[in-house]
Amino acid sequence: MDVGFIGLGHMGQAMVRSLLRAGHFVTVWNRTREKAEPLREAGALIADKIGDVCRGDAVITMLADDQAVENVVCRPHGILDSLEPNKGIHISMSTISPLLVRNLTERHAERNYPFVSAPVLGRPDAAEQGKLFVVAAGDRDSIDFVQPIFDAIGQRTFVISETPETANLVKLSVNAMIATAIEAIGETLALVTKSGDVDPKAYIDVLLSTALGTPLYRPYGENVVNRSFKPEFPIPLALKDMRLTLDAGMERDVPLPIVSLIRDHLLEAIAAGDGGCDWSALALVPQREAGIEQPA
Ligand code: NAP
């Protein structure tokens, strides 16, 4: 397929490589153009303007947050000014608010632009290997049409509903669950190690060798015990997701007390100087509160 791709951060770079490997023709655009250069060698075409990535079968946005997506979609000569009615499908894959996705759904519909929301689960290494999970919502025919794109970047696509914003609600809920796992690792590690008699490595070994040794706990448990906080999913993006989850809860009258606590702990991590770390460093906060950890 002929695919446009906007947003070449940690995830976008890796997703473009998977698309190219699967034989798709990919044209890329990024706010900071230099980040596109390494993809030229891999076979991507680099566009000078957003309009040039909106002429194919689909254009994907994989951007940091609501503000970035609004900027790229709604600015003069942005996506809304560049698509053609009933042609290229805009696939929004960023983790953004259900509210913005509702707004984008309306704005695309007014112009007869097909629009699908398809945020992803998985880290940059999974994106590089085409092993993400895609959570898609929108018009069924549009989703079927772009399935080869999802197959190139993901191992499975979950089609949630015909209403695009529901995909974002599901994605945010899963991230909230992952954050509770990291928080739980930090709290229990503080408890077992404070006496000084338990080696943190021994505790994490018990954790990961038993029922909790799942793909959920494993990478975060290993990061914490190895003090490896290279920002694959940086704390500010995690904070953004908890904020969006709480906003969605507010809109629906759903209290989310654990997510509120995690939002505050992420803020605490940033205040302590760990804002440049992976969200695994959230596990250090309860340990600091117990008086046994320093910032990363
Ligand atoms: P990232 O490395 O921080 O990249 C962010 C991208 O957004 C860059 O291309 C950046 O452009 C662009 N951007 C930021 N502000 C912009 C603006 N105002 N106008 C235009 N472009 C702007 O983030 P990422 O890790 O790739 O994540 C991208 C999205 O996927 C986020 O919504 C994130 O929550 C979600 N996600 C991330 C992961 C993960 O593990 N990293 C996993 C699943 C989902 P520049 O290069 O010019 O800065």
Image (cartoon, rainbow, N blue to C red):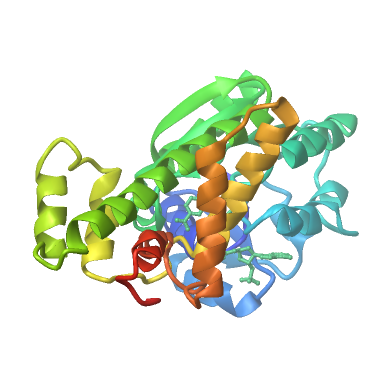
In the foreground, 27 or 153:
153
User: Residue 111 sits in which quadrant?
Assistant: top right
User: Residue 104 sits in which quadrant?
Assistant: top right
Q: Which residue is drawn at 50% across and 50% down?
A: 262
Q: Give the quadrant of ligand 1.
A: bottom right
* Left-right relation of 63 to 289: right
| Residue 136 in sight here | yes
In the foreground, 151 or 228:
228
Q: Residue at x 15, y 47 (%)?
A: 208
| Residue 62 in sight here | no
Give x and y (percent) for residue 251.
74, 31
Give x and y (percent) for residue 119.
55, 41
Quarter placement of the C terminus: bottom left
* Left-right relation of 147 to 228: right
Give x and y (percent) for residue 220.
30, 55
Q: In this view, does 49 lie above or below 85?
A: below
Q: Is residue 20 above or below residue 108?
A: below
In the foreground, 93 or 168:
168
- Toward the front, the furthest residue is 195
* Left-right relation of 87 to 229: right
* Left-right relation of 47 to 167: right
User: Residue 168 sits in which quadrant?
Assistant: top right
Q: Which residue is drawn at 87% across and 58% down?
A: 75
Give x and y (percent) for residue 288.
38, 68
Q: Residue at x 57, y 37 (%)?
A: 118
Q: In this view, does 137 lie above or below 220?
A: above
Quarter placement of the N terminus: top right
Q: How many discs appear?
A: 0
In the foreground, 69 or 226:
226
